[in-house]
Amino acid sequence: MLNLGFDVDTDLHGDVRAGKRLDLGICSEYVKGAPDTGRITGSTLEVSFDDGATWTSVELDGVRGKSAAWTGSVRVPDDARYISVRAPAADDRGGEVKQEIIRAVGARKWRAGWELRRRWHGSHPLPHAPRIIPKAGCGSGVRGFAGR
């Protein structure tokens, strides 16, 4: 059985910056201990900024590492509120996994300091820049992220 995971840097609220370029990663690996595994042969990645009404392909680099992993980037439109993702992965033995997450992460147009202070009602002593959660990736125990 194949697993599929996504890598995306977000702030602590699960949001990314609208109007900026966003690096995305995708990885696929077998469930630990799965018998008769093959070689993971490929994947694609698509994103949507309108809850899945239309999809845009993300150009991915080649397979790297022990697990099958790819990276790409996309420009998030200024007016985007959410990003949806969908991707399949397959192996050379006919195994396949597909995943689609509508509203996987939020997108916000930030002004330095404004967003975090507003979320904490103006008085919490937080830094003036969004805090970023480090990327996880295949083999880290993180297998993707849930939609909102």
Image (tube, rainbow, N blue to C red):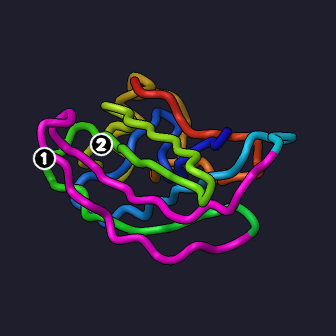
Mark identifier at residue 79: 1
- Dot 2 alpha-carbon crowd within 10 angstroms: few under 14, some 14 to 19, many 20 or more: many
What is the x, y in percent for residue 127? 53, 48
Range covered by the magenta-colored residues: 36-65
Label ID, residue 23: none
In screen coordinates, is 79 left or right of 145?
left
Percent position of residue 110, x then y: 29, 49
Q: How far apart are marks 1 and 2 (CA)?
A: 11 Å
- What residue is drawn where x is 46% and y is 33%? 13
- Amino acid tagged 1: Asp
Residue 120 appears in which quarter of the rendering? top left
Secondary structure of residue under mark 1:
loop
Q: Which amino acid does label 2 sit on?
A: Ile
Query: Relative to 80, does residue 63 appear above or below in the rendering?
Result: below
Please tell me which residue lies in front, 144 or 34.
Answer: 34
Residue 67, horizontal then vertical, whole percent? 70, 61
Where is residue 132? Give x, y as percent: 55, 50
State the residue position of label 2: 83
